[in-house]
Image (cartoon, rainbow, N blue to C red):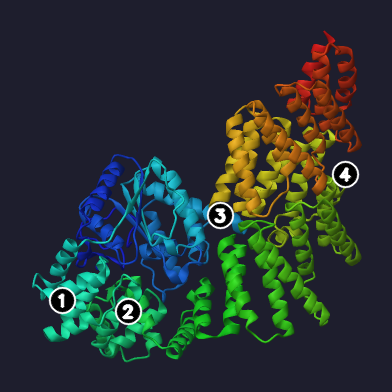
Amino acid sequence: MRAWAPLRLGSVESRFEAFHASGLTELVGREEELELLLRRWSKVKAGQGQVVLLSGEAGIGKSRLTAALLEQVATEPHTRLRYFCSPQHTDSALFPIIGQMERAAGMTHDETARAKLDKLDAVLAKSSTPPEDRARFAEMLSLPNDGRYPTCELVPEQRRQRTLEALMSQIEALTRKSPVLMIFEDAHWADPTSLEALGRVVDRLRTFGALLIVTHRPEFNPPWFGRPHVATVTVNRLGEREIVAMIDRVTGNKPLPASISKDIIERTDGIPLFVEEITKSVLEAVGEGTAERAVAAIPSPSAAVPASLHASLMARLDRLGSAKEVAQIGAVIGREFSHALLVAVARKPEAELQMALDRLIAAGLLFRQGTIPYASYLFKHALVQDAAYGTLLREPRRALHARIAQTLESEFPEIAESGPELLARHCTEAGLIEKAATLWGQAGQRSLHRSALAEASVQLTHALHQLAALPATPALRREQIRLQVALINSLTHIRGYAAPETQAATEQARLLIEQAEALGEAPEDPLLLFSVLYSFWITNQIAFDGDALRERATQFLDLAEKQQATAPLMIGHRLMGNASLFTGEVGDGRAHYDQAVALYDPLKHRELVTRFGQDVRVSALAFRSWALWILGYPMAALVDVDHAMKDAREIGQAATLMFALQVTLVAFLHCGNYAAANAEVDELVTLADEKGSLYWKAQGMLMRGCLFAKTGKVSDAVHMITSGLTAFRSTGSTWLTPANLSFLALAYADLGQFDEARRCIDEAMTTVEITGERWCEAEVNRMAGEIALLSSDPGAAKAQAYFERAITIARKQQARSWELRGAMSMARLWRDQGKPKQARELLAPVYAWFTEGFETRDLKKAKALLDELHT
């Protein structure tokens, strides 16, 4: 990846090219797979984007298959983009993409920031990348803006999303010059943010000329199966004839004794890498007798390939003398490493080090790219690195990790600063627990502020595990509380607010705070306690318990009033707003939302977005839109929707945006603006997929199902709501169940499945009584009446009883919009019974109460019905 521009014959693009150009012995028996890749490439040249998911176990030859494709197309103008994932960087956001760009620009660690920016500009100029996108790339590479790029004040999620979009635009721009061949290696080690970026490429690749090949092991499950432009290829083990051919290639067609060949065939079990390594081990042995003993000493790889490879490598390394130690040092650093870092860690004379490296390269165990001192090295395969690592005893290995950590920190500060998780990993393996905990915590907070939520949860968990192993001190307990609260925040959006993992993290935070308070060590940050109280409150909303919800909200607000701190007071009113609204005290709910919005100061309170799940003003406005609509102010509700969405997009945090999309689309649904609701559902589901958020994806499924029910797609509604309920409940969530079940019941009724319809509406009404979720109680009863009328055995009296109950509940709650719907249902029933005067006298005063929103769906239908009743 030396350039993003189209490559010419003979060019070298990455440090891995030497490896891929060498030998290619593993291509034996891979002709069909290669032919498929070439056919896909032909489609790309015709302008059809293609994706190939290349699956196979470790050592099976996936990388060499992609190398063979590169050789086949080398004479054709095209751009190559190659991304390499690493087992040491599974929680380092965008690691393979950052590596690709650094290699494309030819950056080295000892260059100044200005020199690196110059190189970045040079490589991006070839694709006419705009300055604002260059700024995002520089930021991604942790390079300071020296004034050459426009500055833009963005919150973390905005920066993240614009960076991902800039990457997508970059690829699209390259395809306008020539076909693009993208290879994403070892996706099973990809970090979540890189997988999100990869998903965007897969989704949009179909429209432009690029071939994306994703290699992965079988345990990785790509979410892109079944799409028309996505093909799956499984690379299988070799048969006996192919193994013999491969042995012949390794030996240079000088046959081994039949007994040795037979042992190799039996012990390698068709895994090409192992065939190659065992054969080379045999060739390196002295004399036939020694060779026979060498083969016999190696256990069968059918039980465990890495262990067998380890045994083979041990023999080969032992024969390389001092080079073995250099291989071990490199293995501790990682699959790939720079010459500069190796020199600093190995502490050997340069001549001795180079001699050892030359021997490893000559043995085919290591590959070098570039010239010393700017060279970099790569182990032939991850299994080779694992085996070399495994030859170290525990204490020498820990000492090496400690030396690497110290070297990175003192001599490579830019690496330590841009990737604290790498330094943390070495400290963890070195047994430097306290330092590892600090670094993992820094990495987790960094990821959280960059909206890399999945990475944050992993890093924060690592930090907490390290802290748990240290002797308890006041400072340690404070740090545990701080990180535990941060973990809750990341888990709520990844696993769900009421998921067992989230609840366990919340309970642990409560215990830590109680222990600290018992010792007279209250947290220095007073908002930490409020964060934990908030987590308990949100659990009671999502796994809905009306009594507990009000109790928790009251506890929160009482403590806030006692402290007279603005931020807790603002949040407390927001919580009381929800507790009131969802238990049927709609007017009180609106009043609390009004106070929360009035107390909000964007300069002081937007930073709380990572502490309390979402931005407080956005959440208060979004839920106030529900209260306003229910109370009979649909236009005011839509104004709040507009303001909430505007703020959510400005803030740019994924959690706040997903929240705002889900909550505000309900107002569109109620007002009958189904097109706007559908657009928000699409955006919510896409964003939830990108973030790997089960909770918000389930919400999106449910909202889509309700839209289907409202727009006459009742079969789709049944399927979507049923699936959504299953997914939603898997996160521990029951909130909104009465509303979702009533939509499902109506869809069943429209399909003529009245037993299912009655079952669902009965469950909805029972859930209202058990949980106290009464905000939609009037509507649930109204829908029960509509289902009674639709059934094959019409029950007018039963329907009227439900309608009367719906109107009574609505009046008690001052829920004018629910009352209007109940009155319309009753008016239609009486009209059909020949009682138009009674129908008009019921509906007219309800309609006359409204002062706005006459263009919304319900009020237009009410006006049409009144006009009909007056004729």
Q: Are marks 1 and 4 in contact (CB under 8 Å)?
A: no
Q: Could you tell me the amino acid type at mark 2?
A: His
For mark 3, what is the residue?
Answer: 692
Front label number (3 vs 2): 2
Closer to the eye: label 1 or 2 = 1
Separation (CA) of disc 1 from disc 3: 50 Å
Q: Which residue is denoted by mark 2 in the rendering? A: 310
Q: Amino acid at mark 3?
A: Gly
Q: Quadrant of residue 206?
A: top left
Q: CA distance from mark 2 to mark 4?
A: 68 Å
Label 1 sits on residue: 260
Which numbered dot is residue 585? 4
Dividing the picture into quadrants, the one containing residue 500 is: bottom right
Q: CA distance from mark 1 to mark 2?
A: 20 Å
Horizontal side of residue 802 vs 535, given as left or right:
right
Which is nearer the eye, 607 or 837? 837
Marks 4/3: CA distance?
Answer: 35 Å
**What is the secondary structure assignment of the residue under circle 1?**
helix
* Residue 436 placement (x, y as % from top left): 57, 80
Q: Is residue 600 left or right of residue 314?
A: right
Within 10 Å of disc 1 (Cα), the crowding (few <14, some 14-19, many 20+) is many
